[in-house]
Image: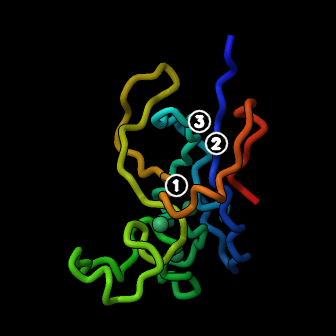
Amino acid sequence: MSRQLYAVLPIAAHPLYLRPCPACDGRGITGDRYEMPTDGGPILLVDVICPVCGGCGNGDPEHLACLADAHAYPDEHDDYDDDDYDDNGQPCPSCGSGRGWNAVQGIGQDDDGDPEGLAVLRVPCGCSADRLVVGFDPDALSSEV
Ligand SMILES: [Zn+2]
Ligand SMILES: [Zn+2]
Ligand SMILES: [Zn+2]
């Protein structure tokens, strides 16, 4: 019997905010995660981005202290143009800043596995493949540093 490999993308801890997001306690993720199979590779354990703060963990409604790419939907992608890849100096054509993940909308599940609303998932980007941490025990793999 072959054992299943799992992988997570650890991301740097968020700064300590004056007012951490009350929904996620400043973590930027809800604590739920989903298994996402890859072609011939380990199963990705994908975090659900906190819907209240958008992933930054900041409880400030103005989000003044946030890094632009801390959010699931950064503003600078508003006028995103596929033809501009080579010209705009973005480190990564997929996630833009090279932050290593993309926000992907998926269907959430309740405890019984029934579909429950939409969740925004923090899916590792191809450019962060070498930062993935792999192991056999999903519970021992944390994406929080
Ligand atoms: Zn939050
Ligand atoms: Zn923010
Ligand atoms: Zn990327």
Measure the C-alpha gap from mark 1 to mark 3.
12 Å
Measure the C-alpha gap from mark 2 to mark 1.
10 Å
Q: Which residue is mark 3?
A: 42
Pointer 2 and pointer 1: residues touching (CB < 8 Å)?
Answer: yes
Q: Report x, y in % for residue 44.
A: 56, 40
**Quarter placement of the N terminus:** top right
* Corner quadrant of residue 25: bottom right
Mark 2 CB lies closer than 8 A to ligand 3 = no
Q: Earlier in the sequence, mark 1 or mark 3?
A: 3
Q: Earlier in the sequence, mark 2 or mark 1?
A: 2
Please tell me the numbered disc located at residue 7.
2
Q: Please tell me whether residue 36 is drawn above or below residue 111 in the rendered image.
A: below
Q: Residue at x 48, y 19 (%)?
A: 112
Q: Report x, y in % for residue 111.
A: 52, 25
The amino acid marked with disc number 3 is: Pro
The amino acid marked with disc number 1 is: Pro
As drawn, is 96 to the left or to the right of 18?
A: left
Q: Please tell me whether residue 6 is drawn above or below residue 83 in the rendered image.
A: above
Pointer 3 and pointer 2: residues touching (CB < 8 Å)?
Answer: yes
Q: Residue at x 68, y 71 (%)?
A: 14
Query: Does dot 3 land on a helix, a strand or a loop?
Result: loop
Measure the C-alpha gap from mark 3 to mark 2.
6 Å
Query: Does dot 2 land on a helix, a strand or a loop?
Result: strand
* Corner quadrant of residue 6: top right
